[in-house]
Amino acid sequence: MKLAEIIALLADAGVASPDWDARMLAAHVLGVGHMSVRPGTEVPGEVLALARRRAAREPLQHILGTAPFGPLDLAVGPGVFIPRPETEVLADWGARQVASTSSPVVVDLCAGSGALGLYVATQRRDADVTLVEKSAEALTWLRRNVETFAPRASIVQADVTDPAILPELHGRVDLLLTNPPYVPETGGLEPEVYADPHDAVFAGADGMSVIDRMTSTLAALLADGGLLGVEHDETTAEAVAAVLAGHGGFAEIATMPDLTGRPRFTTAVRRASV
């Protein structure tokens, strides 16, 4: 069987990127780089078996067992949110903000697989990084990734909407990054979205139920002048900015676009305590 047949199978199933997915599956089985695989490449039956799983809309990352995120290949599977490439924009922003800070204190709330916190940790080996996740299932994957990429990082199981979490870090955090649940409750999305844990994706009818309730936590943790970066739905950029402004503890609130120009991130600076 040639790879072109695998591509056709995935295209017929409605997979958004059949060429890429077929190449990644073939490269995984053959043990080669994806650039070595072409439509005319002969592939073994194992590739067809994996392609049938993908045609059933099982996420590619679950089949491969990893999700690329910048320089990291994060272990993922059922029970943890699959990091998306667009989140790399926020991760890179965060790493640049603390580039000149000595031993920065960094917190990743709603850490999931650890994408944001581990990205910064691998860029700044001297950083004091804490990753917070509530889900026991997600913590299994988070621990694996921390052990692989940043064994010095701390893991805490906690609810990010509780402003009393991490009392030892209150007022000390230089950089706080979060990719919380933010998708408005809806149907009709791509099937792969529903393979992620529901509570890691959806946040009420307006997508704001978690961000609304975690604002006090953000303010409690950040040091005066500490930096905040929040990922959110493109439809809620104004709402997120309004929540932060309404709290009164944040200044320089700004919306940051993703690589397609959509307003997907909000950044802010913690006001000095009075």
Image: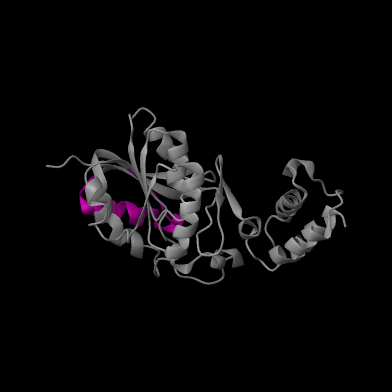
Classify residue 236 as left or right of residue 220: right
Quadrant in the picture for residue 213: bottom left
Compared to residue 184, the image places residue 105 above or below, namely: above
The spot of residue 192 in percent (x, y) is: 59, 64
User: Can residue 20 be seen by looking at this rendering?
Assistant: yes
Q: Residue at x 28, y 51 (%)?
A: 218
The spot of residue 117 in percent (x, y) is: 42, 45
Coloring scheme used: one colour
Please state which of residues 149 and 85 is positioned toward the viewer in this rendering: 149
Please state which of residues 199 and 127 is positioned toward the viewer in this rendering: 127
Quadrant in the picture for residue 18: bottom right
Compared to residue 252, the image places residue 22 above or below, namely: below
Magenta highlight range: 228-250
Please state which of residues 268 and 180 is positioned toward the viewer in this rendering: 180
Image quarter where the N terminus lies is bottom right
Q: Residue at x 74, y 66 (%)?
A: 52
Q: Residue at x 42, y 54 (%)?
A: 232
Classify residue 142 as left or right of residue 74: left
Compared to residue 56, the image places residue 6 above or below, namely: above
- Magenta run includes residue 84: no
Please state which of residues 199 and 103 is positioned toward the viewer in this rendering: 103
| Main SS class of the magenta portion in the image | helix
Q: Residue furthest left?
A: 274
Q: Residue at x 42, y 60 (%)?
A: 182
The spot of residue 83 in percent (x, y) is: 52, 53
